[in-house]
Image: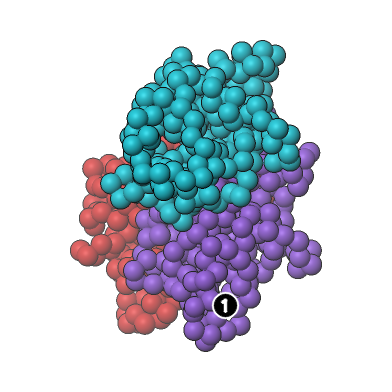
Chain colours: A cyan, B purple, C red
Amino acid sequence: VGKPVFHTERIYDQTPIGVVMGLAWNAMGGSSIYIETMLVEQGDGKGALHLTGQLGDVMKESAQIAHTVARAILLEKEPDNPFFANSKVHLHVPSGSVPKDGPSAGCTMVTSLLSLAMKKPVKKDLAMTGEVSLTGRILIIGGVKEKTIAARRSGIRSIIFPSANRRDYDELASNVKEGLDAHFVDNYNEIFDLAFNDDQNTATP
Amino acid sequence: VGKPVFHTERIYDQTPIGVVMGLAWNAMGGSSIYIETMLVEQGDGKGALHLTGQLGDVMKESAQIAHTVARAILLEKEPDNPFFANSKVHLHVPSGSVPKDGPSAGCTMVTSLLSLAMKKPVKKDLAMTGEVSLTGRILIIGGVKEKTIAARRSGIRSIIFPSANRRDYDELASNVKEGLDAHFVDNYNEIFDLAFNDDQNTATP
Amino acid sequence: VGKPVFHTERIYDQTPIGVVMGLAWNAMGGSSIYIETMLVEQGDGKGALHLTGQLGDVMKESAQIAHTVARAILLEKEPDNPFFANSKVHLHVPSGSVPKDGPSAGCTMVTSLLSLAMKKPVKKDLAMTGEVSLTGRILIIGGVKEKTIAARRSGIRSIIFPSANRRDYDELASNVKEGLDAHFVDNYNEIFDLAFNDDQNTATP
């Protein structure tokens, strides 16, 4: 996903509502990225998603998939919350001048949208990476080593990977993984529990 | 951001409502630029942003981000002001024939839009540079030296940079910074206070 | 602005409502051009601008800027005139086969649109050149010598330049300027006074 964006790492000490940390990588190494979402306006039938951040075609589609997945998850968790039906949402991925692409921020986008819809920040020092299918399956990604190194450098404590990447992670040297609490998931619902069902969420964003 | 635009420097003695001075640079040097905004028309649901000035893709996205950020800040500062929901706004960056790009005028665009929405001019002899994230974080930019030289040449007294650029500024020779009052910010709210919460704002635009 | 268009020079003896003479130049020399505007249709919310004349990207944006500026000026001069909110306007620049570009017809376009909106022709034998910013500042242009020669060849008596071009004009040989009444302006309002506040305007178009 684009060039490593070292200077945008950890632009948030604690991510506010609507913001979630993801992990990117390319041949140059890994880096943390933030998925930022904001409510633009609300009104009957105004549900829409607006994208910025020099996103490539795959990442734009990934955001559309995340929008559909988040809507389905919200219907399950908060059946009376009409957020996605009546809200125009803006999703941005800093920094604005770095081209980004790929599907692996899918689960991060879903989480960011749900955080905005439920007005709940995610757990502190959490990062995640994983392609999401339209039904919420979490699919394998690349760059496990680079992303793990980037997560540690950014002060992350909990990291979420697709179950299909468990072997990649197990094969990493132990010093690379030191201090990291890694989770491996198959379905978005597992990420939901890790990100939102935590006592820390009651803290002020 | 394009070629140095020496002839547009200081086209305003005092910037009117909706106009704010930014700073651009390239390999040829730095220059001041103006972000100009005007109200085109108002009406229920007419909220929109129209762009001119030969802006590149990154700068167009930067303007969209600024529009969302300005809306959120206005909601906080003037909760009853419906400006962005019902106003078609035109944003232009002179001069019209010079191609411009990059994210570093983000904070200048937010300020220009807020000036228009609140009908308040910004503080006199103020210039600013900084990428803005969707939640209002102010991110690192390039060309601190070139921009500082351009600011002094344009008669600027107060200059705003991202906190992440503080070291770049501290390393400049003192004669380059002479007479400049530099501010370093992490969040847009700090820029708001510097630009608008000033006794000079009570003067007639 | 394209090639010199000698065959379009002085296609009007007296420009009608909605038409104003500008000045173009390139490496081959200068020429007069006409900005022509016509009302297409009117109706609630039909405000729009349609462009023809093989205009390049900068000149298209220049027309959009002129549309916004003309709207703001009309609001000031004739607050009850709803022309721009409810009128679809067609702006053309003959001759139709010559590609044209550049921002320097900005002030001419504003004047042409205001002439149409107010149903007033501009002063006879007047030509103007100047980029216009969104707030109505008149910005420096190129080709002062070539444009001055073209103006005299076209029988122009009054010519309007940006103040920033005063030195260029002062340096021209006096025989080039013979018989020309040159005006130098900073703001569009000064052009408005020169173009419309004249006894000749009461004459029948």
Residue nearest the observer in this picture, C54 or B47: B47
Q: Chain of mark 1?
A: B
Q: Quadrant of residue C187?
A: bottom right
Residue B82, image x, y percentages: 72, 37
Residue nearest the observer in this picture, A196 or B203: A196
Determine whether, in the image, residue B63 is placed left or right of residue B200.
left
Q: Quadrant of the C terminus of chain A?
A: top right
From this viewpoint, is residue B12 visible?
A: no
Count of marks placed on residues: 1
Q: Quadrant of the N terminus of chain A?
A: top left
**Secondary structure beneath label 1:** loop
Residue lying at 52% horizontally and 71% vertically, measured from the top left = B167
**Would you place residue A56 above or below residue B7 in this image?**
above
From this viewpoint, is residue A155 visible?
A: yes
Within 10 Å of the Cα at label 1, are there few (<14), some (14-19), or many (20+) other Cα atoms? Answer: some
Q: Residue furthest bottom?
A: B175
Residue lying at 78% horizontally and 38% vertically, measured from the top left = B80
Residue nearest the observer in this picture, A37 or C158: A37
**Would you place residue C176 above or below residue C155 in this image?**
below
Q: Quadrant of residue C126?
A: bottom left
Residue C123, image x, y percentages: 50, 57
Q: Residue furthest left?
A: C28
Amino acid residing under circle 1: Gly
Q: Residue furthest front?
A: A174
Residue lying at 37% horizontally and 66% vertically, measured from the top left = B26
**Would you place residue A145 above or below residue C182 in this image?**
above
Residue B54, image x, y percentages: 40, 51
Determine whether, in the image, residue A80 is placed left or right of residue A130.
right
Residue lying at 49% horizontally and 71% vertically, measured from the top left = B168
Residue A76, image x, y percentages: 61, 13
Q: Which residue is mark 1?
A: B155
